Image: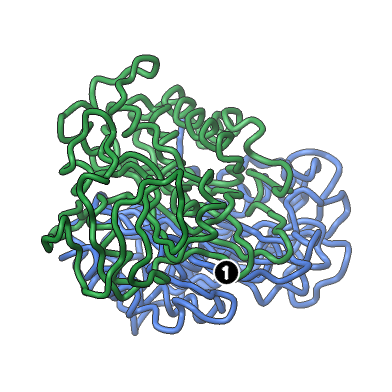
Chain colours: A green, B blue
Amino acid sequence: MDEFALIDIIVDAMGDRAQGEWVHLGPGDDAAVITTTPGYDQVASIDVLVPDVHFPAKAPAFLIGYRALMVSLSDLAAMGASPRYCVVALTLNDAEDGSWLAELSRGMAVAARECGVYICGGNLTRGPLNIAVSVHGEVLRGGAVKRSGGRANDKLYVSGPLGGAGACVSQSKLLPVQLEAMSELQKAYYQPQARFDWQRELSLASCAIDISDGLLQDLTHLVNASGCGAQLIEENIPLVAGASTADALGSSDDYQLLFASEQNHPDAFCIGKLCTEKGIWLNGQLVDAQGYKHFHA
Amino acid sequence: MDEFALIDIIVDAMGDRAQGEWVHLGPGDDAAVITTTPGYDQVASIDVLVPDVHFPAKAPAFLIGYRALMVSLSDLAAMGASPRYCVVALTLNDAEDGSWLAELSRGMAVAARECGVYICGGNLTRGPLNIAVSVHGEVLRGGAVKRSGGRANDKLYVSGPLGGAGACVSQSKLLPVQLEAMSELQKAYYQPQARFDWQRELSLASCAIDISDGLLQDLTHLVNASGCGAQLIEENIPLVAGASTADALGSSDDYQLLFASEQNHPDAFCIGKLCTEKGIWLNGQLVDAQGYKHFHA
């Protein structure tokens, strides 16, 4: 199929998500044109998903597209930003035909609609399947919530239960998967939610990160950036039904937010606190961060 | 090698290009933070380069990195925008080791310095080699130069000689290549220049595009978007020494700018004009656009 016919499939699937409001010029020119809000900074991040690392190659294309957009947007949620637009680069095999691409695009469009963003540009190349999503949002000038602002004695919170995505992987339940009949663990893996609903709470946080590589690894990033340590209370770590503490600690890519704050956040789960002593302490025992790393030694 | 050790190599190579001026927060957090200029719109595009389609896999990594950034930034130049920042997603094989990555990053940093942009974020994944570059610039509100503004009788210009990159490919001169001893054709291919030096001239243009797929194909995009046709004068098409007209028409990815204007642009090459009658006419003969398409039928 011709490159331009494939682009038409994508733009069709995007519908009202290709252009509108702050996006004055969507796909079809050399670049998209976006108006920003006075007094706000731009926030930018890029993620890549490749088959059998970030999703099963045989998963429904709709879920691949939905998940690709959500996990990428999650980085903006972790900064306390409002999402605004994405540009997406697709590298496609011959195996990914027009109907596969239409479903992938439909999944992206649904996620974009749920988060209120536009997918205003992209690129299409032939090669081994690779999905790169560049995401862009806005945050009140000076209001970005970094990883580095945490202080000893700040309480440590997560925005929701953990371990569901990790359990789906560790229990080998990724496949088979049916769009209309997913288990709770499959929903945790395939349909994570970028937690923009926590933006107001995050504005009170001292530091934040989204959990994409397991609680321990992402907490390690947070405490290293903040120059402190953390004490976790194991029984306070909220778990998705069917997930173990090990799933939550080691491999959860649930895309819940992990943040520290001096304030009380009754809707969040308090799982411990930051402390002066370096390292991560689980019920008083020093632990190694075991989170999944894409590049092993 | 560990993911984080590789990221350190990249950030080291970026040096002063990772953060500064309008980029308040560079690599190392969930997202970068960028301040925009009041009264300006954002302009965004994404490109992907894969081996043996967009560059020879065996080319020096420095040139791959340099070229990847320049060809991506070229889309911003074609909008009349000022470049501001990039985020880069790298998918790397085992074959690309630390020294390869350092050279790739060094090439990107040199291109970034030449264009005055920051590479303020990225992503690293394991898989078949794939380089995605998301580029972002600014243009005075309402001042973006689109493909669609051309009118019959506008003069048609290119910003420089064409066909060099195409000739390098058609004459099989891509390899061997040595950084310090490149031929003119190799320089045209490996070291294209994003033509931000044409920004003032472009502000007078009715429409513009950068030539990434050959003059005929990119001119076709321009006239289709503008709802007109074009008359080319073959002998006016400026050629890189050693390139043929066929190289210029069919396969040049020289990243010169192609634009139409009512004005005179004495520093540009006038290659014809836009006309009411649809299609592209070369010395009065209707021609087919033969430009290279990544996705053949």
Relative vertical location of residue A170 with respect to residue B3 in this rendering, above or below: above
What residue type is disc 1 on? Ile
Left or right of A148? Residue B178 is: left
Please name the residue shown 57% across and 52% down the image.
A200
Please name the residue shown 46% across and 70% down the image.
B120
Left or right of B11? Residue B232 is: right
- Numbered disc 1: what chain? B
Relative vertical location of residue A244 with respect to residue B249 in this rendering, above or below: above
Relative vertical location of residue B27 with respect to residue B17 in this rendering, above or below: above
**Image spot of residue B108 (x, y percent):** 41, 73
Q: Quadrant of the C terminus of chain A?
A: bottom left
**Which element type, helix, strand or loop, lies under badge 1?**
strand
Please name the residue shown 61% across and 58% down the image.
A138
Number of other residues with Cα within 10 Å of mark 1, as a class: few under 14, some 14 to 19, many 20 or more = many
For residue B24, say whether it is visible. yes
Give the labeled residue for mark 1.
B34
Relative vertical location of residue A174 with respect to residue A135 in this rendering, above or below: above
**Image spot of residue A273 (x, y percent):** 31, 61
Foreground pick, A65 / B143: A65
Please name the residue shown 60% across and 60% down the image.
A139
Foreground pick, B137 / B195: B137
**Image spot of residue A122 (x, y percent):** 53, 46
**Image spot of residue B3 (x, y percent):** 23, 63
